[in-house]
Amino acid sequence: MSGDDDWWTSSNEAVLVSLVTPTDAGVKTLDTFHPEYTNNIFGEKEQIFGYKGLRINLQYNASDMLPNLKVSYKKKYQPTADEEALDINDVLSEFLPEVAFQKQSDFETRLKSIPDNWTPPGTLVTSFSSKDGEYEVYRGKITDPAVRQLLNRIQILVPFFVDGGTPIDLEDPDADRWTIYFLYNKRPLPNQPDKFSYHFAGYSTLYRYYAFQVPTEFESKTPTDTPTFTLDGDFDLDTLPCRTRISQFIIIPPFQQKGLGSRLYSIIYQQYLKHAPTVELTVEDPNEAFDDMRDLADLAFLGKQPEFQALKIDTSIEIPEEGRAPNNIVDQAAWDACRKKFKIVPRQFARVLEMYLMSQLPESVRPGLGAPEDEEDEEESGRSSKSKGKSKEKALPKPTPEDEHTYRLWMMLVKRRLYVHNRDALGQLELKERREELAKVFAGVEFDYARLLIKAEEQSKLAQADGETADEGEQEVPATPSAANGKRKLDDVEQTEGDGAAASSKKARVERE
Ligand SMILES: CC(=O)SCCNC(=O)CCNC(=O)[C@H](O)C(C)(C)COP(=O)(O)OP(=O)(O)OC[C@H]1O[C@@H](n2cnc3c(N)ncnc32)[C@H](O)[C@@H]1OP(=O)(O)O
C-alpha cells in the first residue's frame, strides 16, 4: 500500500457507460449512466488503485451495442517493487469482447458501416407504445450467432446492475437451453418517417429445466408398467415438460421507472403461458425491485382472471377456539387448478392471492399502511379493526362481526402459509414465542401487501395517463386499500424468515421454488 489515498478511485464513479450514435463528425452521446455495482469486477471495496483523474468510459453504439472502451487519466502511479497501478484493460478483458478494445477511430468507422435498416437480432415478438415512444421485443436463442454476439457485448451489465449476478457462460454445452428477450426503443429517423433507429433498452435471459412430472393416479406407478422412455433420432428435446426460469432481467437506467420492466415481464410471462412444454415460470434469486415489479404484474393479470376471482374466503368456516387453523379457507382443489393453469410457482401464487383477497376485505377491516410495531397480535387480542393504518382523513365504517370474522379467516390463511414456510425455525420455539414470532412475520407481510396494493393503484393510474396500448399481459388492477399515512421502511420478511442477506442484494429474497 502506498498509504496515499489520492491514488484510489471509486470504480462505480470512474466507470461511465455512454450510449452513442454515429454522426458525420464521429459519435453523439445520447445517454450516460454509472454502474450500481463493480465489486465483481474491481473487488469488494469497489476501488481502483493507481490513477488520478481516472475515467473509464464504456461507449456502446445504442443499436447493436458494439462496445468501445476509453480509459483516460491525469496521472498514473509509478510502479514500485510492491505495487503498481491496476491494469484496467486487463481486468475488463474478462467481461468485454475483444472488439471493445479497438481504437476509437476504428469504432467510429465501424459504426458508420452499420446499415440504416438495421434491426435487432432474433424474432419480433410484439410491439407496444407508451407515452415516451414505441417499443419492440425480440426473442432469440443463444445458438443464433447474432443473438449470441449481442449478449456477449452486453453481459457486463449483469455485474454492473445485479448484485451477485454473473454473466452466462456462452461456451456452456447446454447453451441452447437459453432464450433471450431484448427490449428495443424504436424511433423514426429525422425526415425519414418510414425508417427507424433502434435503441437498446433492456433484456432478460431465461433457462429451461426439465420438469419431472409426478404421474397422475390414472397412470401406472409400477416400474414394470411404466413405458420405457427412449429418444429416437428426431426427438425434439424442446417438447419435454420444463420449468422456465428467468435468470437475468435488466432495464438500463435511461429506460427505468417508465413501466417498461413490468411490460417486458408481462410479455415474457404471456409467452410462456402459451408455451405448452412450460409447466411453471420461475425466477432465479429475484431482488426486491424485481419482486415488487413481478408481484404487481402478477396481481394485475390474475386479478382479471375469472378462475382467480372465484377463489374466495369461505366465510361459512367456523374458527376453532384452540388448535390448528382450518385448512380449507380457500378451496384447495380450485387453488391448485388455478395455479397450474397460470403456471405460477406455489409461493408466488399464494402471495398474490393473499394480496388480492386482502384488497377484497370489507373496508372496515382492510389493512392499510399503519405502523406494525403499534399492532398487537389480532388473533390473541380478538381486536380486529385493521383500519388503524388507514387515512385519518376518512371515517371508516365500524366493523361488523361478519367483517371481523372474514378478516380473521384471511389472517389465518396467511399465517398458515407463513407457518409452513418457516416450520423448521418456528418449530424450535416455545409455543408462546412461536406465536409472537409468527405474529411479527405476519405483520410485516400484511404491511408489505398494503404497500404493494397502493403501488398497484398508482401504477394503474400511470398506465392510464400514459395511454399505453395494452397487450394481453396488462390488465387493470383490483380494488386497493384507499389510503396511506406515510411509508415506513419495511422489515424484510424474508430476512425475518431466515435470510440474513442485505436488503438490496439479488440474493436478499431467494425464492424457494
Ligand atoms: C431475476 C433478476 O434478474 S433480479 C434483478 C433485477 N434487475 C435489476 O435489479 C437490475 C437493475 N434494475 C433494473 O433493471 C430495473 O430497475 C428493474 C428491472 C428492477 C425494474 O424495471 P423498471 O422498468 O424500472 O420497472 P417499472 O418502471 O415497471 O417499475 C419501477 C417503478 O416505476 C413505476 N412505474 C410503473 N409504471 C410506470 C409508468 N408507466 N410511468 C412511470 N413510472 C412507472 C413503478 O410503480 C415502480 O415504482 P417504484 O420504484 O416506486 O417501485
Image (tube, rainbow, N blue to C red):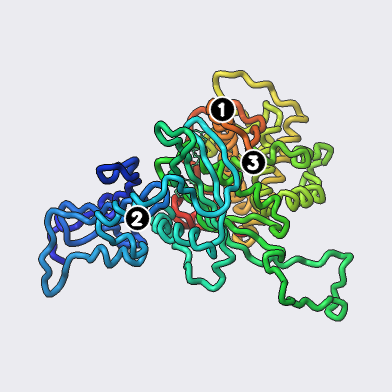
- Whether label 2 touches label 1, CB < 8 Å: no
Residue shown at the point (29%, 45%) measured from the top left:
27
The residue beneath circle 3 is: 473
The residue beneath circle 1 is: 467
Q: Nearer the viewer, residue 315 or 133?
A: 133
Q: Residue 307: x, y in percent?
A: 78, 41
Element type at mark 1: loop
Question: Local crowd at mark 1 within 10 Å, few (<14), some, or many (≥20)?
Answer: few
Q: Which mark is residue 105?
A: none
Where is the C terminus found, in terms of image quarters?
Answer: bottom right
The residue beneath circle 2 is: 67
Q: Nearer the viewer, residue 480 or 318?
A: 480
Q: Amino acid at mark 3?
A: Gly
- Mark 2 residue's CB less than 8 Å from ligand 1: no
Q: Is residue 251 left or right of residue 141?
A: left
Q: Amino acid at mark 2?
A: Pro
Q: Amino acid at mark 1?
A: Gly
Whether residue 157 is visible to the viewer of this picture, yes or no, is yes
Residue shown at the point (73%, 50%) measured from the top left:
339
Element type at mark 2: strand
- Whether label 3 touches label 1, CB < 8 Å: no
Residue shown at the point (25%, 63%) measured from the top left:
88
Q: Residue 145: x, y in percent?
A: 49, 63
Question: Local crowd at mark 3 within 10 Å, few (<14), some, or many (≥20)?
Answer: many
- Give the mark, 2 or 1, whose residue is nearer the N terminus: 2
**Gap between marks 2 and 1, in whole Å?**
35 Å
Q: Residue 127: x, y in percent?
A: 57, 40
Q: Is residue 252 left or right of residue 56?
A: right
Q: Nearer the viewer, residue 389 or 154?
A: 154
Element type at mark 3: loop
